[in-house]
Amino acid sequence: MPRHYAMGGRAGSGPGWQGREPPPKQTLRQRFGALRNLPPFLRLVWETHRGFTLATLGLRLVRALLPVATLYVGKLIIDAVVALVGHPVAADGLAALWHSGVLDPVFALLLVELGLAVLSDLLGRAVSLIDALLSERYTNASSIRLMEHAATLDLEDFEDSELQDRLDRARRQSMGRVTLMAQLFGQAQDVVTILAFAAGLIVYAPWLIVLLVIALVPAFIGEAHFNAQSYSLDYARAPERRELDYIRQTGASAETAKEVKIFGLHAFLIARYRELAEAFYAANRALATRRAVWGTVLTAIGTLAYYAAYAIIVWRTIRGDFTIGDLTFLSGAFRRLRTLLENLLIGFSQVAGQALYLDDLFSFFTIQPEIRTPAQPRAFPRPIRAGLAFENVGFRYPGAERWAVRHLDFTLEAGEVLALVGENGAGKTTLVKLMARLYDPDEGRILLDGHDLREYDLDTLRANVGVIFQDFVRYHLTAAENIAVGRIEARADRARIERAARDSLADEVIRRLPDGYDQVVGKRFRTGVELSGGEWQKIAIARAYMRDAQLLILDEPTAALDARSEFEVFQRFKALAAGRTAAIISHRFSTVRMADRILVLDGGRIEEIGTHEALLAAGRRYAELFELQAAGYR
């Protein structure tokens, strides 16, 4: 079924944002409404490592009280020193002062302040260490959760560009929001410090709080506004960012190096990259400039309010209302409180901005698969007795007007090998994906032994289907692991792996590798050995043989093989498929003619079906395609 995603996609193409929907505008309520994402985010942090979470919060609580204590001890030191000015013993020199014991309180206070400074430094380092460890654990845990959820989604989700944008944003947030955790914990620490400083100000001069509000509100509103603009811009750029990453990878990777050199694509790719990057830069520059200008203006307002308060404190000290120590404490407390509150409010705005990004992560987790196991699934038949029956099956890809396949009515008998033939785009691969229930039909139904395919347990169904697609993945793992992915839970069963390799003729390839089955294949890693297309194909076919599958599906399994290897591989396939049901897609009629029956597709519809001899005798589409290929050998 076509799926529509809630957060919008691109409406244009190319660099910049011409011809596409503008970035989503965020109202003030929406900006701070995103704070709803913080409880689930903190729950994820808590579940990641409870010990680290408790430790960082506890240490921060202690550290939050140290600035107030240090400043107050400084006030006491100044008052004590001022009291000693003009003391009679002072005229006799420092030694006399020391032996008189008059300096003992000052010395004790200095030791206390030194201890507080050392303790603050130790706590800061401990907090940094724990935050780093917790951040690493959170990044790993959220990435694993993202992978686990992605594994549950339907294939057509991954073929949708809009979901790819959402997945890209979610992937970036799973790794990029670790700073939010430290910021939130830092905000909590600052709140405790602010309360302590505020208590001191209220005791001496409660009117200073009013000046603080005047100093801070403008900067807070400005920061909230620009954070929302930054998010809207970043949200809108997801398609271009994916394109930028793709061009960067294409221009400098082993997989594309041959064609890039042969076709001279470097200049084209670099120009395309530069064009996109310049569009990014222009948008960022405009936003950064506006933010810097307005930030300067709003900060100046706060600075004026601070110096107005400072002047009042100085005047009252001159008048005798405050001691010199009080002056030091109040001016220091007001300055620190202003900085803390400014950081808190701006940080709160930044947290709200970062919480907007969490929408990208959590909204991805709201996507649910449409292809799923029913509440009371039917047991998968072993063996398959009646086979697969397509009853007026139709399917079209999300957003497409043209049907990929339609009005499919045929039966794949149990134990039969059925070949699918047709020109490119005829619907062959779509048909076998429907067999494996990677898609569900939009029309009609597919029956397995008389029951709808949707009635069976999805995991059991997939476990009983062995599929190798023409665009199989070349894993940069060992040869043994490349084969074992066909049944990953049996990756330690070397005998099974070697048997699958023999059946697919991959054992001949592996014997020539320096480390045999333990050799890394592919050139991504230093010890890797590259294989030819045909060698890779033999390893891919071995994956299908790893499975104890009732239904075997091979999509262009021998396209990269030479004629002799193709003949041997298919002969073995026929032998191994004995007693099993199989479907094979191939453009080579030397392979196709060995099937029990052949189904010819054209434009997503069944053109004809029958044996090789019967279809040749009919003289229709199959006979035409056969003669076209045969003419090339004459």
Image (cartoon, rainbow, N blue to C red):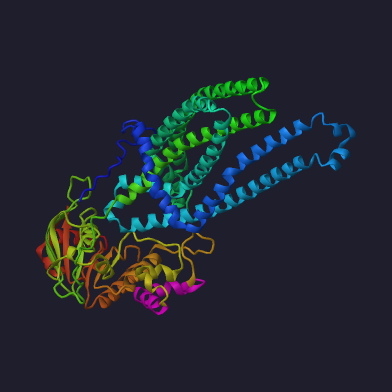
Give the percent coordinates (x, y) of residue 358.
39, 45
Residue 168 shows in the view = no
Quadrant into which the C terminus falls: bottom left
Is 169 left, or right, of 439 in this rendering?
A: right
Can you name the residue that lies furthest to the bottom here?
495
Residue drawn at x 36%, y 75% as measured from the top left = 500
Give the percent coordinates (x, y) of residue 195.
52, 38
State the image quarter where residue 35 is shown. Answer: top left
Q: Nearer the viewer, residue 225 or 291?
A: 225
Q: Nearer the viewer, residue 218 or 630?
A: 218
575 shown above or below 86: below
Span highlighted in magenta in the image:
494-517
585 shown above or below 117: below
Residue drawn at x 67%, y 39% as measured from the top left = 73
Residue 586 shows in the view = yes
Q: Is the magenta stretch mostly helix, strand or loop?
A: helix
